[in-house]
Image: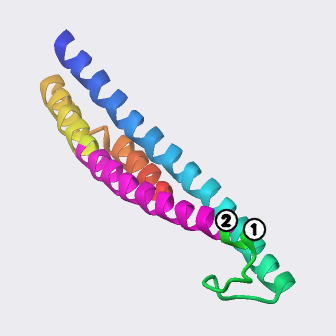
Amino acid sequence: MRSRETLLRLHRFRTEERRRQAADIDTMIQDLAKKYDELDAHVRFEETRNGVTDPNSVNYSMAAKAARGRRDNLQKSISELKDQKATVMSMLADEEADLRKVELLMEKEAGAAPASEPVAQAAQAHYTNLH
């Protein structure tokens, strides 16, 4: 019985860790998106100020060119973070399924009725809030 409790705690920890990872990635994506918007506004300002919007032009603003490069790099980083989040969300779904299996096994051994339904509903609500 003790080993099952340890297994249950382990699965709960792993599930919560995946949720924290997903939340951290969301925060990073939001921060980078905000910086992307600021750089995009800066590029537009420089293009308007200089009157040249073609990055290939000799007269194109160096500040706009530099900001454009940083902005494009941020977009790549955001894309990579979204891929990482998809991976973490898949891992979270697997961990939640494993946790549910262990909880059901514990209930079965205890001879109790499925009392963990509120736990599963709370986990599903939390998972839904992460999207």
Q: Front-most of 92 and 48?
A: 48
Label drawn at residue 66: 2
Residue 64 location, quadrant? bottom right
Label drawn at residue 51: none
Indicate yes or no whether the magenta region holds residue 3. Answer: no
**Helix, strand or loop for disc 2:** helix
In-image side of 18 versus 63 (left or right): left
In-image side of 34 versus 105 (left or right): right
Quarter of the image that includes the N terminus: top left
Seen at 40% across and 34% down, the residue is 17
Q: Front-most of 80 and 118?
A: 80
* Render colour scheme: rainbow
Seen at 60% across and 84% down, the residue is 56
Relative to 85, residue 116 above or below: above
Disc 1 target residue: 63
Image position, residue 107 (x, y; %): 20, 30
Relative to 115, residue 50 above or below: below
Distance of mark 2 from mark 1, alpha carbons? 5 Å
Residue 82 location, quadrant? bottom left
Pick out the residue farthest to the right: 49
Q: Main secondary structure of the magenta part?
A: helix
Pick out the residue farthest to the top: 2
**Helix, strand or loop for disc 1:** helix
User: Could you classify mark 2 by the number of other residues whose Cα lies within 10 Å: few (under 14), some (14-19), or many (20 or more)?
Assistant: few
The answer to the question of whether label 2 and label 1 lie on touching residues, with beta carbons closer than 8 A, is yes
Count how many numbered circles sit on residues in the image: 2
The magenta span reads 67-94
